[in-house]
Image (spheres, rainbow, N blue to C red):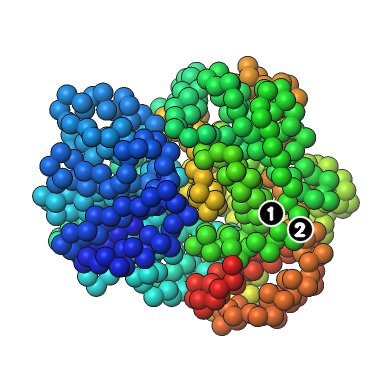
Amino acid sequence: MCGICGFYGRDDNLEIKNMCRRMKHRGPDEEGYYIDDNISLANVRLSIIDLKTGRQPIYNEDESVVIVYNGESYNFKELREKLEDKHEFYTNSDTEVIVHAYEEYGIDFLKKLEGMFALAIYDKDKKALLLARDYFGIKPLYFSLTDSGIVFASEIKAMLEYIVPELNQRVFADLLSLRYNPHNETLFKNIYKLPPACYLTFNKEGISIRRYWKYEKNVDASRVEDLLVKSVKKQLISDVPLGVFLSGGVDSSLLVSIMRKFTDKIETFSVGFEDFDFNETSFARFVAEELDCNHREVVVKREDIKLLPKLIYYLDEPIGDAILIPTYILSELAKKHVKVVLTGEGADEIFGGYIHYKAMKIFNRINKPILKKVIYFSIKNLNNEILNKFFNYPSKIDDKEKEKILEFLKSNNLSEAYDRIVRIFSENEIEKLLKNKYKMKKNYIKNLNDILIYEIKNWLPNCILLRLDKITMANSIEGRVPYLSQKIYEITPISINDKMLLRKIAKKYLPKKIVKRKKQAFFVPIEIWINDLKEYFFSEFSKFKSSKYIDKYYIEKILNRKSLIYSKQVSSILAFELWYRIFIDEETLQ
């Protein structure tokens, strides 16, 4: 696991080294450079595989092809066996296998890789730079066109050594409303994300971006268990200690149980919350004891919300969700014991398990005017405690939350309903909040299956995986996601059914107590924190620097209201405000 960066169109020793310095947390073990006429490539390395000879950049036999690489190719040993007759190897790393696979198969080498990656290959003979990103966007990769060529990096902050940061207002409304940026444009003007499953070529003829893999299916549910077991086994490859983020839910518990088939010693890590009734640690502890794991726990305290400036810095783009805090603290704990962690990210998207999927399924079933009207008035007249039990929500449903449920029922179609359930600001609220009119990204959801595909393309890479990568790498550990194998995705049915297929598999591996446990959102008690830490929030907003774009008085109204929805709104605005001060005003807040 590493960070990569570079530029094509000029060479500069100092700038490329300064870019690496800004990403040192991604690769504290060593760094390497390739600098030639008009091209500079660099890598900061977190040594996981081939600790002795895997230093990057890595070359082919005559050094006409050079690579810097971030990620893991879990099938590199099989690929190497096919290439050894034709190519000479001087390392035991997966990175060198990719160099020779590129020589042998051309751009089709990308379809042969299994794993997570962001890579840059410079072909001297063709005088061409190739950038590529893995199937689901597990590893980040950013680029920008400049007057002299192109600059790229694993993290935007490295590119700011080269580019003056400016706010890109085109993504603004969506970022605040969704709490993440769903666009390929970033919040920084003229800096872009390379989309998942895509490659970019840059040469004297210009730039080209193409897709090498499509989200297509050849369903065979009978093979899912076998491929999941193989995926977990392959992702145990490591020359350093590894562990698991264990929540006690089906996803992470199943990973631990499958791991038990291949290893005796398993390190597990779990997180809970101070003074809060909803905690998953008891379930995680139960699983760890059942599977004889070496288990550790950490507690998040309300004052830990003051970590936000540091976390926004590491993210590059703000995510307005307080889940960043427990993720960071859990990574901090894991760092003391392991260098790699397996996590359950991706299971909900692949197997259809999110709570809001159930709401969309219910809406689809009742989407008839008379039926919706009856249900609307029934819910309107129910008290909030009954609603709380109905929705199985860890926090009490308040009047604002109830209002959102009623608005959801007014939707005319699935696209409208989806927007109302995932956005924390409505279009009307965004108009009041923002001083200029910004358009929101349209979704094109016609049926329930479209929701899963939309979230795999948008929510998964731009929020879930971005958060996992940036927060684990902030602590110099590698996060692996065994559920996100393209082979598993291709054969798994698209279905919103509370992960029935995964639960069926889990019955063979886990106690009933875990398999039958209802899905719970990983919940951070932000509305309690905000109420108890008003002084901190008012202090941060008193320094308000983004008032050029956001109505300060509208924020004050939100701050004085106690509600889960309002708390999420405050978190989203605060994340943007901190980002603005760190990256645009260049304040030191960490």
Residue 481 is at least partly visible in this image: no
Which residue occupies 64% across, 45% down?
333
Mark 1, residue position: 408
Quadrant of the image for the N terminus? top left
Q: Earlier in the sequence, mark 1 or mark 2?
A: 2
Can you give x and y, in whole percent of width and height, for residue 577 in the image?
Answer: 60, 72
Q: Residues within 10 Å of mark 1 (few under 14, many from 20)?
A: many
- Tell me: residue 37, above or below residue 338: below
The Cα atoms of the two marked residues, 1 and 2, are separated by 31 Å
Q: Residue furthest bottom?
A: 548
Residue 372 is tagged as none
Q: Residue 270 lies in what quarter of the image?
A: top right
Residue 77 is at least partly visible in this image: yes
Apparent side of residue 311 relative to residue 540 in the rendered image (left or right): left
Can you give x and y, in whole percent of width and height, for residue 320 in the image?
Answer: 61, 61
Q: Residue furthest front?
A: 52
Q: Nearer the viewer, residue 207 or 418?
A: 207
Mark 2, residue position: 302
Identified by mark 1, the residue type is Phe
Which residue occupies 55% across, 73% down?
588
Can you give x and y, in whole percent of width and height, for residue 274 in the image?
Answer: 80, 50
Identified by mark 2, the residue type is Arg
- Local SS, label 1: helix
- Tell me: residue 430, above or below residue 126: below
Can you give x and y, in whole percent of width and height, for residue 414 in the image?
Answer: 58, 49
Which residue occupies 65% across, 38% down?
269
Quadrant of the image for the C terminus? bottom right
Q: Residues within 10 Å of mark 2 (few under 14, many from 20)?
A: some
Q: Nearer the viewer, residue 363 or 328?
A: 328
